[in-house]
Structure formats: C-alpha cells, structure tokens
Amino acid sequence: MGLFIFSNLQVDFDYWFFTTGVLFFGFGMALAATPATVAITSALPRAQQGVASAMNDVSRELGSALGIAVLGAAMTATYKTEMESVTQGLPAEIAEKLSSSVAFVQMDPPAQLVPVWDSLVQGGMAAYTLGVGNSLTIAAWVALAGAVAIAVFAPNKVSIVK
C-alpha cells in the first residue's frame, strides 16, 4: 500500500499523503522483514542457522540489486520517452543532454534556452515524477504478487527445528 501511495506523489505533494505512505510502508516492512528472517533461520537446526542467515542475506542483496536495476531501467525509459516531447524542436545535442538526466533542472539556463527554460524545467520534473511513479507502481505490483504467492504456497504450519 505504501508503494502504491508513493507512486502517486506529485512534484508538489501533500505532507500528510507522504506520511501516510511512510506509515504503510514501515508497517509492512515491520510485519515482513523480521518474521521472514526468523522463519528462515529457525527452519534449520542450530548448527546450520549461520548458513540459513547467509542465504537470507544473499537473497535479499540479490533481490535488491535486481530490483534496483529493473526499476531504474523503467524509470529511465519513462523519463527519456517523456522528455522527447519536452525537448522537441531543440538542437539534438542539447535535447540529448536534457534527456540524459533530470539534474539539469538545478543548473542556470544556457543563454540560448532562457526563453523556454521554465517550461523545460517543468517538463523535466514532470517526466521524472512520472518515471518514479511508474517504477514504484511496478514495485508495488511485484510486492503484491509476492504476498499472494506466499499466502497461497507457504505452509500453514511451520515446524521449528531445534
């Protein structure tokens, strides 16, 4: 739920809307992270719990790296696509620079772009916001699919090995 809320944030967002997202996200992480670690490590005998902990850490790191790559690619693709219409009519070299990073919104405008700079900055911020929103929506759907998969396939009873 927190990811779905974050995916709808705009450039000028409401503090309470953001706080609601943080609360949902934090509550969900609290309900998932520690119990998952306990379930994984306690499923093996004490002598093998170090291996279980290491596998848990590796899976989280791998999932994080893969998630960052996929979501970053989705965000970048959306940003570049949206910037095509924003930079239409500009020289190709300048359009490419503006489309390669949203960081341009923090710089002083080049002399030849002063008349259109404000619209370029607003377009860049809108493209970035849409890209982040799309990537967070993907993350939310993946998290929801994972929760459904766990609810369907996880065993109803967990036996703790001592």
Image (tube, helix red, strand yellow):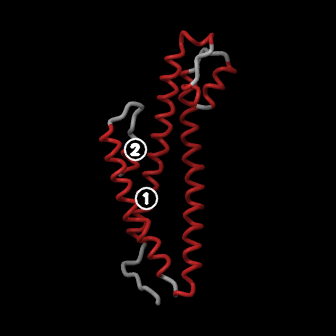
Instruction: Give percent across and percent down for residue 78.
Output: 54, 35
Q: Residue at x 54, y 70 (%)?
A: 56
Q: In the drawing, does residue 2 fall left or right of residue 139?
A: left
Residue 18, given in percent of the width and then of the height, sits at 35, 42
Q: Which residue is mark 2?
A: 6
Q: What element does badge 2 sit on?
A: helix
Is residue 33 toward the left or the right of residue 66 in the image? Answer: left
Q: Amino acid at mark 2?
A: Phe
Q: Looking at the rendering, which quadrant does residue 75 occupy?
A: top right
- Camera-side residue: 26 or 4? 26
Outermost residue toward the bottom in this view: 162
* Sequence order check, earlier mark of 1 and 2: 2
Count every numbered label the image shows and give the total.
2
From this viewpoint, which residue is outermost toward the right?
A: 93
Q: Residue at x 47, y 90 (%)?
A: 162
Q: Nearer the viewer, residue 82 or 8?
A: 8
Q: Position of residue 87 (x, y in %)?
A: 58, 20
The mark lying in front, picked from 1 and 2, is 2
Assess disc 2: are there few (<14), some (14-19) or many (≥20) residues with their C-alpha within 10 Å of its C-alpha. many
Q: Secondary structure at mark 1?
A: helix
Q: Residue at x 38, y 47 (%)?
A: 4
Disc 1 versus disc 2: distance between alpha carbons?
Answer: 18 Å
Residue under numbered circle 1: 145
Amino acid found under the numbered disc labelled 1: Ala
88 over 12 or under it: above or below: above
Q: Quadrant of residue 103 in the image?
A: top right
Rendered position, 151 above or below 86: below
